[in-house]
Structure formats: structure tokens, C-alpha cells
């Protein structure tokens, strides 16, 4: 069967579109088939197909951009049990494993199937009668409201803290290098079986980030009002207003995310490289 792939790129980034075009050409040279968003199809990248209508024969989804682009496609890969490869053309890209500067090498591995697929835990988030999934994290914050909010966090029914500040973040080990790290959380290797719970800018001086076993059931309690909306953000992609008493339950999902590994990169080597890039960006600014 002809190997088929679905390409998705950040529509606001020219580098992603250029990288998608180069990789699509390399895939077709090896007998592969490429489906893609209609706007990329108009540029000759592949056959037009909406993200929500990926054909059954597609072997993997390839996202071009940064971590946000990859997370945007996550739900569709979960619905179809597809592995996902991120090709880094953005800024942070901690989840991205493919290289935009080597389309021939990447295409060879994709078409031949010479790649590994690693599975990562997902958070199951339940709020207001609905269920969501997070690969990185979820945050409950004050949103646009400038004042202090109160968030009570419980682990398996036991109160961990009651924080007065900007809110709280719950993250997977994969997401610990995202919002949690910026909020003062620890560096956690991605294969560590744990959850990270971080209070945000709490006025209680002794409150610190907490590491919990991976299977812990976490509950966040807060109170929002129409004139004082809080915000629940799931992987930075799904934003939900909290306008009343909120009970958000977080646990380990049964399903897992499948990320393709084209390059074998050590966690701390990747962290050092990313930090060097971030430092250079700070210097240029």
C-alpha cells in the first residue's frame, strides 16, 4: 500500500509552509502520498483535505511549526489513533523531533517506517460535564481579571494547598518544561512517572510546586462570576471561561499520545540546546 501522510502547518508562519513543501516533494519522490490543509494544497503541498476529515489510509500526521501547532493537531490524532511527528520551524519546539533542514532524510525514514513511536501519558480533564485531554498541562487562572483568586488543590481528596494568587497549573512530565517550569517548577525528565502541581504567584510564601505520583486524582476548586471570569486553559489550545463555582477534576487518561521519534535526542542535551536558543533570542531583543 502506498504510504500516506497528513501535513499540517501553522498558517501564520511561512517557514512552516516552506518546510512542508520540501518534505512533501521528498515523500512523493519515494512513492508516498501527502494530504494536507486546503490552504497548503493551494501551494502544491498535497491533496486538499480538512484536518477533521483525514483519510483512513494515512499512516501519520506531520505538524510543522512549534509546540502549539503540534498540540493543535493532538485531538485528531487521538480520535484516529495516529502517531504524530513535529517538524520544528517555530520558536520553542520542545515537543518537535523532526528537522526542517533535512527533508530527504526525514522522508526516507517516514516512507520506509524507520522511526520509533513513543507513548506519553495524557491528562483527562473533566469540567462542566465535559471531558478533555491534555498532553502538556492545564491551567486555572484569573484570566482578564486583575485581582487575586483563590484556588484549592486536592490530591486524592486531601488538600495540598489553598493558594491566593494567579491560579494553578497541573502538568504531565512532558509538559513540565512548559508553563510549570516558567512558573518556578522543577526540571522533570519526560520519562518520569509523575504529575506536577504548581501554584501561580501565590501570596503564601511557603507554597511551592508539588510532585505527585502519576496516577493521582487532582481536583481544583475555584469560584468565578460573570463580572470576574476565570479561565481554564487546556494545552493552551482550549480556553474555557469559569463564571461560577468550579470543580475541575484531573486524572490519568487511559489513552496515550503517540509521538514519532526521527532523531534520538537526550533530554538534557535538548534542554541545553533550547536554553541556548532562548538566551540568544533574549540577547537580540
Image (spheres, rainbow, N blue to C red):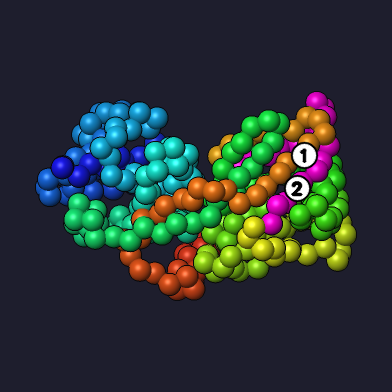
Does the magenta run of residues contain 233? yes
The residue indicated by pointer 2 is: 219
- Label 2 to label 1, Cα distance in Å? 7 Å
Q: Secondary structure at mark 2?
A: strand
Please indicate, yes or no, whether residue 263 appears anywhere in the rendered image.
Answer: yes
Using the rendered image of the protein, determine whether residue 37 is visible from the camera's viewpoint. no
Q: Is residue 201 above or below residue 78?
A: below
User: Residue 78 falls in which quadrant of the image?
Assistant: top left
Please give the name of the residue rendered at 64% of the width and 57% of the height, measured from the top-left corner: 215
- Any magenta on residue 170? no
Say if 165 sits above or below 243 in the image. Answer: below
Identify the residue at image location x=20%, y=44%.
3
Direction from residue 188 to residue 150 in the image, left or right: right
Compare residues 252 and 268 and report the one nearer the observer. 252
Q: Determine the secondary structure under disc 1.
A: strand
Sequence-first tag of 2 and 1: 2
Q: Are marks 2 and 1 in contact (CB under 8 Å)?
A: yes
Residue under pointer 1: 247
Quadrant (top left, top right, bottom left, bottom right) of the N terminus: top left
Residue 206 placement (x, y as % from top left): 86, 66
- From the viewer's perspective, is 204 left or right of 110? right
Label 1 crowd (10 A; few <14 / some 14-19 / many >=20):
some
Residue 210 is situated, as x and y percent measured from the top left of the image, at 73, 64
Q: Nearer the viewer, residue 75 or 62?
A: 75
Numbered range of the magenta stretch: 216-234
The structure residue drawn at horizontal position 48% and vertical position 65%, both measured from the top left corner, is: 274
Mark on residue 61? Answer: none
Q: Residue at x 76, y 46 (%)?
A: 220
Badge 2: few (under 14), some or many (20 or more) residues near its Cα, within 10 Å? many
On the rendered structure, is 65 left or right of 271? left
Left or right? Give the position of 272 relative to 52: right
Q: Give 83 or 177, whichever is nearer the viewer.
A: 83
Amino acid at each position: 500500500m502506498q504510504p500516506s501522510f497528513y501535513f499540517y502547518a501553522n498558517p501564520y508562519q511561512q517557514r512552516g509552509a516552506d518546510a512542508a513543501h520540501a518534505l512533501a516533494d521528498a515523500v512523493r519522490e519515494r512513492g508516498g502520498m501527502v494530504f494536507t490543509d486546503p490552504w497548503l494544497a493551494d501551494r502544491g503541498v498535497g491533496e486538499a483535505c480538512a484536518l477533521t476529515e483525514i483519510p483512513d489510509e494515512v499512516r501519520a500526521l506531520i505538524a510543522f511549526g512549534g509546540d502549539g501547532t503540534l498540540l493543535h493537531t493532538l485531538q485528531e490524532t487521538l480520535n484516529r489513533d495516529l502517531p504524530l511527528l513535529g517538524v520544528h520551524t517555530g520558536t520553542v519546539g520542545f515537543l518537535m523531533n523532526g528537522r526542517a533542514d533535512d527533508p530527504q532524510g526525514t522522508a526516507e525514514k517516514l516512507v520506509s517506517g524507520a522511526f520509533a513511536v513513543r507513548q506519553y501519558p495524557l491528562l483527562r480533564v473533566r469540567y462542566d460535564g465535559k471531558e478533555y485531554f491534555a498532553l502538556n498541562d492545564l491551567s486555572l487562572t484569573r484570566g482578564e481579571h486583575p485581582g487575586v483568586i483563590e484556588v484549592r488543590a486536592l490530591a486524592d481528596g486531601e488538600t495540598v494547598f489553598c493558594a491566593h494568587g494567579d491560579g494553578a497549573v497541573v502538568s504531565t512530565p512532558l509538559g513540565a518544561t512548559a508553563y510549570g517550569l516558567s512558573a518556578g517548577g522543577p526540571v522533570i525528565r519526560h520519562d518520569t512517572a509523575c504529575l506536577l502541581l504548581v501554584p501561580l504567584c501565590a501570596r503564601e510564601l511557603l507554597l511551592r510546586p508539588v510532585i505527585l505520583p502519576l496516577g493521582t486524582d487532582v481536583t481544583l476548586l475555584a469560584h468565578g462570576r460573570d463580572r470576574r471570569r476565570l479561565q481554564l486553559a487546556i494545552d493552551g489550545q482550549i480556553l474555557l471561561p469559569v463564571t461560577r463555582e468550579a470543580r475541575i477534576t484531573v486524572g490519568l487518561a487511559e489513552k496515550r499520545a503517540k509521538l514519532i521519534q526521527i532523531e534520538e535526542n537526550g533530554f538534557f542535551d535538548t534542554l541545553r540546546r533550547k536554553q541556548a536558543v532562548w538566551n540568544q533570542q533574549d540577547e537580540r531583543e
